Amino acid sequence: MPANPGPVDAAEFTTALRQYAAGVCLLTLQDDIDDVGTTVSSVMSVSAAPPLIAVGLAAGGYPAELLGDVGRCAVTVLAAEHAIVASRFSSAGRPSARHLLESVPWTRAAGSGAIVLSEGLAALDCRVDRLIEAGDHVLALLEVDAVPVLNPAGRPLVRLRGRYVDESGTPAGRS
């Protein structure tokens, strides 16, 4: 049996996973004061019955903290033309979600009251099933209550090697 080579270097681990192309989503939630959102690419389908998804969030971040408090959110699957939206929501110290979405059509999901982008590929209105601590992240297991947006003909936004690209690997639009 080979010897354990020791812990994996964090930079090497990050570089390795940057080779994995991932869809890009916008997770939004609303509390009594404001709208909050964050870009996420760690999203996966977990179950169709009941409909569950899992989303990875930074453990020390406000979206993870707030999600535990409010218990509901929405997840919009971003289209290629939403690259600038993804960049805005991934920046530190960002203002209210509504300010970051000027000139981007959006509405509110009925159950969560969270913002969903009208021109996203899909949006899922969710409630928290459970939050699981996972290293420096929190894994949010979310039950999907509704699909308020569904545009299956759109081009997806993908994150690959630290860049936003479309499904062909071409740098994504900046609208």
Image (cartoon, rainbow, N blue to C red):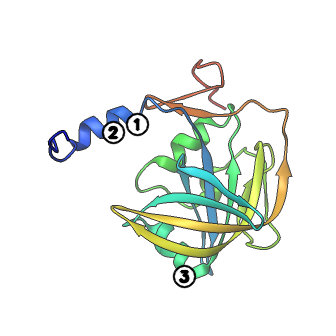
Circle 1 — which element? Answer: helix
Residue that mark 3 sits on = 69
In this rendered view, identify the residue nearer to me: 31 or 96: 31
Identify the residue at image location x=69%, y=32%: 81
Looking at the image, residue 52 sits to the left or right of residue 158; the answer is right
Give the mark nearest the N terminus, 2 or 3. 2
Residue that sits furthest to the front in the current view: 1
The percent position of residue 139, horizontal first and vertical second, equals: 49, 64
Residue that mark 2 sits on = 14
Residue that mark 1 sits on = 17
Compared with residue 12, is residue 103 higher up or lower down, i.e. above or below?
below
Amino acid residing under circle 2: Thr
Is the residue under label 1 in contact with that under label 2 (CB below 8 Å)? Answer: yes
Circle 2 — which element? Answer: helix
Identify the residue at image location x=58%, y=51%: 43
Give the mark nearest the N terminus, 1 or 3. 1
Looking at the image, residue 122 sits to the left or right of residue 97; the answer is right
The percent position of residue 6, horizontal first and vertical second, equals: 15, 45
Within the image, what quadrant is residue 52 found in?
bottom right
